[in-house]
Image (tube, rainbow, N blue to C red):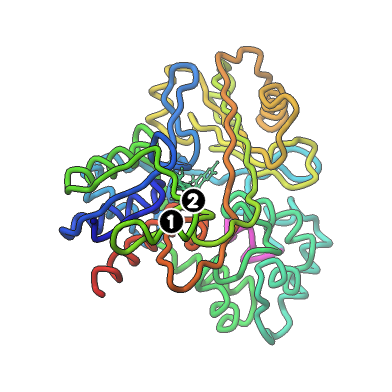
Amino acid sequence: MSDFSVVGGGVGGLVVARRLAASGATVTLFEASDHLGGTVARHEVGGIGLDAGAESFAVRGGGVSALLGELGMQEDIVAPAPGPAWLQPVTGTAVPLPATALLGIPSDPLADDVVRVVGLAAAEQAALLDARPVDDVPATLGALVRGRMGDDMVDLLVAPVVHGVHSQHPDELAVARAHPGLADAVVSAGSLGGAVARLRAAAPPGAAVAGIRGGINRLVPALADDFVRRGGDLRLGTRIDHLGALGALGGTVIVAAPGVAAPAAPGRRIDLVTLVVEQDELDAAPRGTGLLVAAGAPVGARALTHATAKWAWLREAAAGRHVVRLSYDETPADPVAAAVADAEALLGVELPIVVDAAHVFWMRPAAASVPSEVVAVGETVAGSGLAGIVAHAERTAADLLAR
Ligand SMILES: Cc1cc2nc3c(=O)[nH]c(=O)nc-3n(C[C@H](O)[C@H](O)[C@H](O)COP(=O)(O)OP(=O)(O)OC[C@H]3O[C@@H](n4cnc5c(N)ncnc54)[C@H](O)[C@@H]3O)c2cc1C
């Protein structure tokens, strides 16, 4: 019998399993499918190896970089091309996102690049609202920004950015999850714009995200190989369906799969379409590394990543072709045709030569309240995103080992 059993071989499960095995404990990892990694996956489109799910990680906290260092991949950490992301507003052509904003919340609502997105009337109203004293900080980011900068600031600017980062609407996102220091900063600065200015000034210079040369998916075999090298026992194709089955597993059980420890609320489906195209006009990266799309804009896609503009290693691998990835909250009837039309509209260029295309979809788990006696890691308890999941899984392993 193992000291620990881990259910689920996504990044959350792999990180906790590897750390426990590294301490000398015996660990068995059960994965339902025939492969590891979950939402961190690889596919080939037009003969190019690409990420099929996550494609970057947030550098905050330094946990993912430290892990990559331990796995001998420090030299493979790469920064994306610099420059602002772009926004496709409800009407008109795409614009660069305001330069001095946090999750789309401007430090100065009257800055030219903010006025260009929300209009002068909304910008002036935001400045007036945010000049009032701070009484309290509401629970959700949407309520906070609506109260201090008005509805237009949320709907036209903050919602598309927050959706792109957290896959959630700001009305559903807790202020603490959006940014752990934001509530305190609003109180101490006495305004939302002032809080954003302070937090931006305190943030380390450089990009907020990083990637891995060759793709984020390289993390999965690196973690798995290290786990096995340290004596870990890997069981693919083994589904553990409910809490009752957990008792039959060995030692302390750690749940790293949605729906096992608590009934899963219905998740959300995200469709991704990746296009490999030939179009020299894209060499100039007309929309930087990509765009976020405001709800109500006349395209179905919610975001577009110009992957060959974002990652130098990919530009090299694509040998003159371009890789563009679009995400959808609602599955289009003909995903590839919709993606080509949306990419043309968003990038402002025609795409007559589509070399290859791929359509994948992912189900994202809803947050779950896990019974207190169950040890859980991964997205359902740590939120979406590798930085938070890795940090939480490392903390969980340390707590278990300290017991
Ligand atoms: C399209 C997309 C793009 C993303 N992009 C980014 C990004 O760029 N940067 C970023 O930081 N984050 C990104 N994310 C989020 C990030 O990928 C996830 O938050 C993270 O990978 C989730 O890891 P996890 O281990 O919690 O869960 P999962 O990856 O879902 O892994 C769970 C694993 O458990 C297995 N499993 C399920 N049920 C059982 C069972 N009953 N028994 C045994 N095994 C089971 C599954 O097969 C799976 O392997 C993205 C997500 C999506 C969908």
Q: Position of residue 362 (x, y in %)?
A: 57, 40
Between residue 394 and residue 283, name the one nearer to us. Answer: 394
**Range drawn in magenta:** 99-109
189 left or right, relative to 385: right
Residue 195, quarter of the rendered image: bottom right
Kind of residue sitting beneath label 2: Asp
78 left or right, relative to 98: left
Which quarter shows the N terminus?
bottom left
Q: Predominant secondary structure in magenta? A: loop
Q: Position of residue 49 (x, y in %)?
A: 41, 25
Q: Are marks 2 and 1 in contact (CB under 8 Å)?
A: yes
CA neighbours of label 1 inside 10 A, class few (<14), some (14 to 19), many (20+): few
Indicate whether residue 105 is drawn in magenta: yes
Which quarter shows the C terminus?
bottom left
Residue behind mark 1: 245
Kind of residue sitting beneath label 1: Ala
Residue behind mark 2: 241
Residue 60, quarter of the rendered image: bottom left
